[in-house]
Image (cartoon, grey):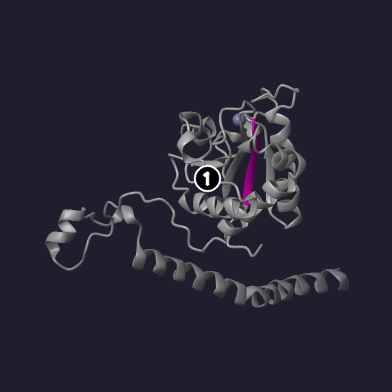
Amino acid sequence: MQSQYDDDSWDGSEYSLMRQFWHYLPVLIFLIVAAAGMYGVYTIFGSAADKPKLDASQVLASGFSAPIIKAVPLKPVAQRLAQSPSPRRIGIISGHKANDPGAVCEDGLTEEAVNLIIANKVVDTLRERGLRTDLLDEFDSRLLGYTGTAVVSIHADSCDYFNEEATGYKIADSLFTDSTALFNCMEESYGTITQLPYHAYTITPHMTDYHAFREIAPGTPAIIIETGFMNLDRSLLVDQPDIPANAIIDGILCYLEIAP
Ligand SMILES: [Zn+2]
């Protein structure tokens, strides 16, 4: 005797299969349509390997279009955005610092010491005014390739007595970078503020061929100034170092077009 359970089982199984077919029919239709679509895309656009290739001359000869690939020389990437101006940077060389005493007076006063007092005042004041300023030794390792708005080397002249003409200041500018504007500002400011004469005729190759001019980066204007003679101009350089220091600061501010 067939059980009620068996009959129900057979009928139920058949019913279940049909129900699953209808349930999954949309998925089946979707897969067929998708496969057809992919085949269509493949045949329309095809693979490159299936198509005849034309080289540039054939394309040109066809007269319809320019070659798609043509040789373009390599070019450096151009700066697309204007750069903001670099911050100002001033290098102050304190003459002979950390190298040698420079000129020496009979009483032991050294040019190195005279220069350093003035250079420190210049550096402190420029920093107070918000200018990035480096105090540099005579042969500072930072001088090699130094990049800045200006480099000013501070020296002083001999302590020996020559004659009454041995007074005054002098300036030489870099042979490698046009430093005329810096030179002119310093000459004007230093002469006006110190009231010293310009002592042009004792400018030596030590000044014009100054080592730092060759070491710093091209494009960095540079001058060397002899602030005065340690003999006849001693009271100004030693007793009133604020005056030559302020004169140098004024010359730098003039060059930077900053109001003193
Ligand atoms: Zn010197």
Up-down relation of residue 253 to residue 148 (above or below)? below
Closest to the observer: 216 or 46? 216
Outermost front residue: 164
Residue in the picture at 23% in, 55% down: 52
* Quadrant location, the N terminus: bottom right
Up-down relation of residue 133 to residue 207 (above or below)? below
Write the start and end of the magenta stretch as one range.
Answer: 89-95
- Left/right of residue 83 with respect to residue 40 in the rendered view: right
Residue type, label 1: Tyr
Residue in the picture at 33% in, 56% down: 48
Report helix, strand or loop for mark 1: loop
The x and y percentages for residue 121 are: 74, 46
Closest to the observer: 33 or 79? 79
Picture quadrant where residue 259 is located: bottom right
Q: Is residue 105 rendered magenta in the image?
A: no
Q: Pointer 1: residues within 10 angstroms few (<14), some, or many (20+)?
A: some
* Quadrant location, the C terminus: bottom right
The residue singled out by tag 1 in the image is: 198
- Left/right of residue 136 with respect to residue 34 in the rendered view: right
Picture quadrant where residue 160 is located: top right
Task: Count the labels in the image.
Answer: 1
Which secondary structure class fits the magenta region best?
strand
The x and y percentages for residue 25 are: 61, 76
The x and y percentages for residue 151 are: 58, 43
The x and y percentages for residue 92 are: 65, 42
Picture quadrant where residue 175 is located: top left
Residue in the picture at 15% in, 56% down: 58
Up-down relation of residue 43 to residue 124 (above or below)? below
Closest to the observer: 195 or 27? 195
